[in-house]
Image: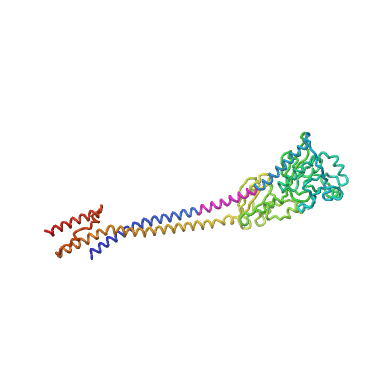
Amino acid sequence: MAVTQKKGSFRRNVIATFLVISVISLGVTGFISLQFVDLIGGFTTAQSSDALATQIERNIKIAAEQNADVIQQKLESAEGLVKAIAEECESLFDSASTYLPRANIYYDYFFEYGAAGTYPADTHYEERYGINVSWNYSSWYAPETDSSDYMTYYAANQDAIERVSNLDFMFQYAHLQLPEFRWLYVGFENDLWINYPGSDVGGSDTDRAAEPWFPTGDEFYQEIRAGSGSMVFYGPYLDPIDNVLLMSIGRAVYDDSDTLLGIVAGDISIESIRTKILDVQVLETGYAALITESGDILAHPDVDDEVYERYDTQFARLPTLQEFEVDGTTSALTPVEINQILAGTTGIIEFSKDNEDYILAHTPVGVGGYICIIIVPVDEVQAAIPLLEANIQAANLQATTFILMITAAGILIAGAVAILVANQITGPLQYLMELATRNVSAMIRKDSLDTTDLQVDASYMDKDDEIGELARAFQGMLDSIKEDESE
């Protein structure tokens, strides 16, 4: 029994040794792998969170740029159409021009007060304008004329009025291409005014007598004229015809002797631009705004429509950005930050108001001196970060579980391999020891040796390793015993 116990101990020692080596190596490898996963996971979480926050800020900046591009494209389209009309107007006043006037030309008064004279057949009430208009014809106006004497003025200025009548088709085309145009017009230095769509400009005869309108005296006319042929963006200002806040795009026009004729311009309602800006939503509560290069607000969700509807009547000026981005009763933006916004560059500013942090992205529109702004709460910008971190942690947990499972499976496999190896090593040894025991027992009892006990299993002797050598040596010993017994 003692010998058998030793055999068993050797086998257990082999298995135990193999398992210890395997567990240590696999355990160390697993531990290092877990530490590596934890390190990489933490690094990835930090880097990914920072990258996500940076990307979201970049996206807000891109959103501001895209909004600015939309406004810029509208303004550039308007600029191109007005420029084409101005060039056509100058060609009509070229001494070599062979223009033919339109068959019908209309005085503005009769669009609204039609009983006393002629007006286009398509004249109709347009709710957007609040007056009667014609989309097929322009109207002409001159201060200090009325429904009783306008023909006298027409006779004196017939050449200019008839030449400009040819622009009706270009006016109509420009409006179809860009419906944001509220008015298109030609103003002359003698205050002759050609207006599209055709409509009443001067009001009733009583109004014309009491308060005649002289276009050349208005600031928008003077600013466009001062551009000396370059395109000028002017505004916002109150439309003198129907009290709507407008921006004007135009340039001075000249005849072929470089004599100033007047201006050609188009007006775009601030309302049409405000709508585009106010419809923008960023994340949950983020919003867009549009300001002038002096900081006046053209569009902001907190500025009531009434401010623009009553501009220059109840309100003497447009509100500024500082007045609506406030923290309590003071501006949430410092003078340095305001200057940064108005500098005409693209950038990001972080500021606080009402105990909440915000990100402000600003970018110039590119034309007209306008600046587009996007404002988003920081909490909304960072809202996606916890989800990202949770996803990364879940991935790290999966990796950790996988490593532990692989390590456990490795230990089980190592145990099976240890048993297999131990059997391969101790099996032949146990066989030889049992064979030797039987022979020794027979010799002690002086019994005849069993033939099978004097022959080592051929499968062991055929091995080309230490077991084979031991089996063959053992067979040699048995052969000697067999010879002694036969003697």
Question: Where, quadrant-wise, is the C terminus in this rendering?
Answer: bottom left
Q: Residue furthest left?
A: 487
Relative to residue 52, is residue 455 drawn left or right?
left
Q: Quadrant of residue 167?
A: top right
Q: Is residue 127 above or below residue 232?
A: below
> Which is the main secondary structure of the residues drawn in magenta?
helix
Closer to the camera in the image, 462 or 157:
462
Closer to the camera in the image, 226 or 118:
118
* Image coords of residue 385 (percent x, y): 54, 56
Residue visible at 78% across and 48% down in the picture: 134
Question: Where, quadrant-wise, is the N terminus in this rendering?
Answer: bottom left
* Image coords of residue 423 (percent x, y): 29, 59
Is 245 a magenta residue?
A: no
Residue visible at 75% across and 53% down in the picture: 309
Q: Total label count?
A: 0
Q: Quadrant of residue 106?
A: top right
Closer to the camera in the image, 32 or 338:
32
Q: Which region of the structure is painted magenta?
A: 45-68
* Image coords of residue 302 (percent x, y): 68, 55
* Image coords of residue 210 (percent x, y): 85, 48
Relative to residue 6, is residue 323 drawn left or right?
right
Q: Residue furthest right?
A: 148
**By what rule are the colours in the image chosen?**
rainbow
Closer to the camera in the image, 293 or 91:
91
